[in-house]
Amino acid sequence: YIDDHKTPSLAAFVLDYQSLVSTYIGQFDKIIDAKASLERKMRIAYFAKHPKRKRGLSLKVDLEKLWSSSKLDYTIEIEGNKTLEASIKTSGRNIRKRLEVFVE
């Protein structure tokens, strides 16, 4: 991303890669932690590409809407996995019972 843009910024990165950023920030419990992590990663990537520059890039970004929708998606995924786990356990028990009857 930094190579492709003359003046990269975190806000532009978030707009260009919303689904990727949404997935990444969904793992955080607090929006402050998610934003700090994104800022840190962007700063590190920028100065790795441009080590001689003194000033960094713009790191101002509003993640409220994206973070709340990401948390909702993450919560739905977790609940879906819990439901799936319960149905798999039930199916496993039923199959084991059938196999026990078949083996006898």
Image: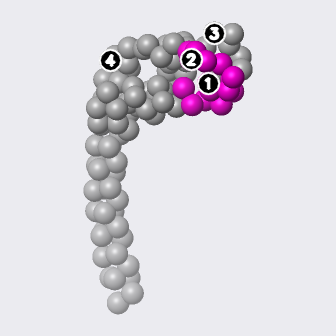
- The 10 Å Cα crowd at callout 3, few under 14, some 14 to 19, many 20 or more, is few
- Residue bearing the label numbered 2: 56
Residue 15 appearing in the image: no
Residue 39 appearing in the image: yes
Tell which tag, 4 or 2, sits nearer the viewer: 2
Q: Amino acid at mark 1?
A: Tyr
Kindly report the distance in space between the C-alpha atoms of the residues bearing marks 3 and 4. 24 Å
- Residue bearing the label numbered 1: 46
Kindly report the distance in space between the C-alpha atoms of the residues bearing marks 1 and 3. 11 Å
Question: Do tag 2 and tag 1 residues touch (Cβ < 8 Å)?
Answer: yes
Picture layout, residue 17 above or below residue 28: above
Kindly report the distance in space between the C-alpha atoms of the residues bearing marks 2 and 3. 10 Å
N-terminal label among 2 and 3: 3
Q: Residue furthest top?
A: 7
Q: Nearer the viewer, residue 34 or 69?
A: 34
Question: Do tag 4 and tag 1 residues touch (Cβ < 8 Å)?
Answer: no
Colour scheme shown: one colour
N-terminal label among 3 and 4: 3
Q: Residue at x 34, y 16 (%)?
A: 65
Tell which tag, 2 or 1, sits nearer the viewer: 2
Kindly report the distance in space between the C-alpha atoms of the residues bearing marks 4 and 2. 23 Å
Q: Residue at x 28, y 62 (%)?
A: 90
Does residue 93 appear to the left or right of 47 in the view shown?
left
